[in-house]
Image (cartoon, helix red, strand yellow):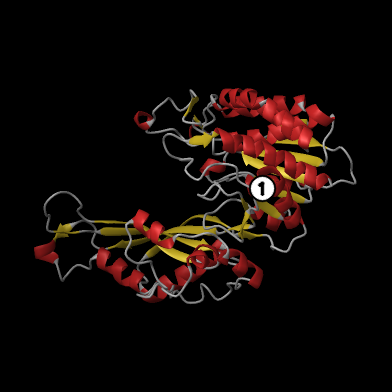
């Protein structure tokens, strides 16, 4: 590995120039801008690394899929990422144009540099470094990139089901998201899922005068306020009947890993301007984000919201909500329990289902955990933090539940990468560390 690390060090300047050229090509899935051009670039690059690479069509944007088998007796790792990016709006908030990358203050600034083009490009350069130094790869690799992650990965489940034979690997590794805010490397074993829905209450056929009809016409805002009060109590407990019954408690290994994660709670509360945390008050910080479902009101809309007053009784109110899921909850289970609860407490309220994503979890005692930890330590010189799961949602369930393989997230980006926001950035040192980590991972798997 020392020769490969030396080669990476010698080529740092070239690597930065190349990733800047790559992210200068827009690939905005929401607007279908540049998608096929960037996908074609990736296929061309993979073929240059002697991968059997191709575009695979879907009803939406295509997947990029590449294979290189060097020794059937060696492990096969599937490296997943996405080549699509978020829209760059608002453009006026960018210091430099989003698709004209610049290096400032030790960072590369561009849309997609952190999420996710810079991170999967680091993986590609890690593969290239092995080939340049040794002429071969230490393990077998499947490289899979999708073009719709930023719009919810609507095709990925069918893609995996339809291409099971092409995706047979021993493990899946995703490099996406940030390191810990201290800069410490991270290995994540799971993600929470999500179920989003609207609660829609209606009153009269139109808005009416609150003096002429108040006390006569039901107020849909009050209907929702009263309904929502039956769904979560003042202590923060979800009170929807049956919704949390299947939840699997965290293992001792998971609880121990969570207890070791660094946390400056007073600083977190200061940064957020908080005097107290949400309930339940006896629940530790990391437990809240990893081991329990949550019910959130994302928005509440109804009636007049302009300046001054308007004595109106609105005819409709909408609460937009989500539930974050932990194993083994499913969106369908949550939707069914929500619908049953609403039918009991407010039968005239409509539940409108939106998107859902299953949670995913790989056991922390998987044999691959030690390999990944050793790889990160070799590349970074420090022990990684181990996250049993994270609070957000990624489509990792397709690997653990459909492909039925262990899946891990090993991110390379700085915590303040500003992904999805103006002035997205990636520290140059994090980018180079990502190449080193990717190269070390392949090496350790080959051992």
Quadrant in the rendering for residue 315: bottom left
From where the camera sits, is residue 320 visible? no
Residue 274: image x %, image y %? 33, 61
Q: Nearer the viewer, residue 350 or 389?
A: 389
Name the side, left or right, on which 256 lies relative to 4. left
The answer to which of 202 and 61 lies nearer the viewer is 61
Where is residue 40 shown, x and y percent of the image? 66, 26
Density class for disc 1 (Cα within 10 Å; few <14, some 14-19, many ≥20) is few
Q: Is residue 216 above or below residue 126?
A: below
What residue would you read off at disc 1? 158
Number of marks present in the image shown: 1
**Front-most of residues 420 and 152:** 420
What is the secondary structure assignment of the residue under circle 1? Answer: helix
- Residue displayed at 55% across by 60% down: 261
Residue 208, quarter of picture: bottom left
Does residue 186 sit above or below 113 in this rendering? below
Q: Residue at x 64, y 39 (%)?
A: 434
Instruction: Answer left or right for 61 relative to 304.
Output: right
Residue 137 seen in render: yes
**Residue sitting at 73 percent across and 64 percent down?**
365
Q: Quadrant of residue 39?
A: top right
Q: Position of residue 64 (x, y in %)?
A: 68, 34
Question: Looking at the rendering, in which quadrant would you find the N terminus?
Answer: top right
In the picture, measured across the screen, residue 219 lies left or right of residue 134, that is left
> Residue 299: image x %, image y %?
34, 56
Residue at coordinates 51% horizontally, 72% vertically from top-left? 243
């Amino acid at each position: 590995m020392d020769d490969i690390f030396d080669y990476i060090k010698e080529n740092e300047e070239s690597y930065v120039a190349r990733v800047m050229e790559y992210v200068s090509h827009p690939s905005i899935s929401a607007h279908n801008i540049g998608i096929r051009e960037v996908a074609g670039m990736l296929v061309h690059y993979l073929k240059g690394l002697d991968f059997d690479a191709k575009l695979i069509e879907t009803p939406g944007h295509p997947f990029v899929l590449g294979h290189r088998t060097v020794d059937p007796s060696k492990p096969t790792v599937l490296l997943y990422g996405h080549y699509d990016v978020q829209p760059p709006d608002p453009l006026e908030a960018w210091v430099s144009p989003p698709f004209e990358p610049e290096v400032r203050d030790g960072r590369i600034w561009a849309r997609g540099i952190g999420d996710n083009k810079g991170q999967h490009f680091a993986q590609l350069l890690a593969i290239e470094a092995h080939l340049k130094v040794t002429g071969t790869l230490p393990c077998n690799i499947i490289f899979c990139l999708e073009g719709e992650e930023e719009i919810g990965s609507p095709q990925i489940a069918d893609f995996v089901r339809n291409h099971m034979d092409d995706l047979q690997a021993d493990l899946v590794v995703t490099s996406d998201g940030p390191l810990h805010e201290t800069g410490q490397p991270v290995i994540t074993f799971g993600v929470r899922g999500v179920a989003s829905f609207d609660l829609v209450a209606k009153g009269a056929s139109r808005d009416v005068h609150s003096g002429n009809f108040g006390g006569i016409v039901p107020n849909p805002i009050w209907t929702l306020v009263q309904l929502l009060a039956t769904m979560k109590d003042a202590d923060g407990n979800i009170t929807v009947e049956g919704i949390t019954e299947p939840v699997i408690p965290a293992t001792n290994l998971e609880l121990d890993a969570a207890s070791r994660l660094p946390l400056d709670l007073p600083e977190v509360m200061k940064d957020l301007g908080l005097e107290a945390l949400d309930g339940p008050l006896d629940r530790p910080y990391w437990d809240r984000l990893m081991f329990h479902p949550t019910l959130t009101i994302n928005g509440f809309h109804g009636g007049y919201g302009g300046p001054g007053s308007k004595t109106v009784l609105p005819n409709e109110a909408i609460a937009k909500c989500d539930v974050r899921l932990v194993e083994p909850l499913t969106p369908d289970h949550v939707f069914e329990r929500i619908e049953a609860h609403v039918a009991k407490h407010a039968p005239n309220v409509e539940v409108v289902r939106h998107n859902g994503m299953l949670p995913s979890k790989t056991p922390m005692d998987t044999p691959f955990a030690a390999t990944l930890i050793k790889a990160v330590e070799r590349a970074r010189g420090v022990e990684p933090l181990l996250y049993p799961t994270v609070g957000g949602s990624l489509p990792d369930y397709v690997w653990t539940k459909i492909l039925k393989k262990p899946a891990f997230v090993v991110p390379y980006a700085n915590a303040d990468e500003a992904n999805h926001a103006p002035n997205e950035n990636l520290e140059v040192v994090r980018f180079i560390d990502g190449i080193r980590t990717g190269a070390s991972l392949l090496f350790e798997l080959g051992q």
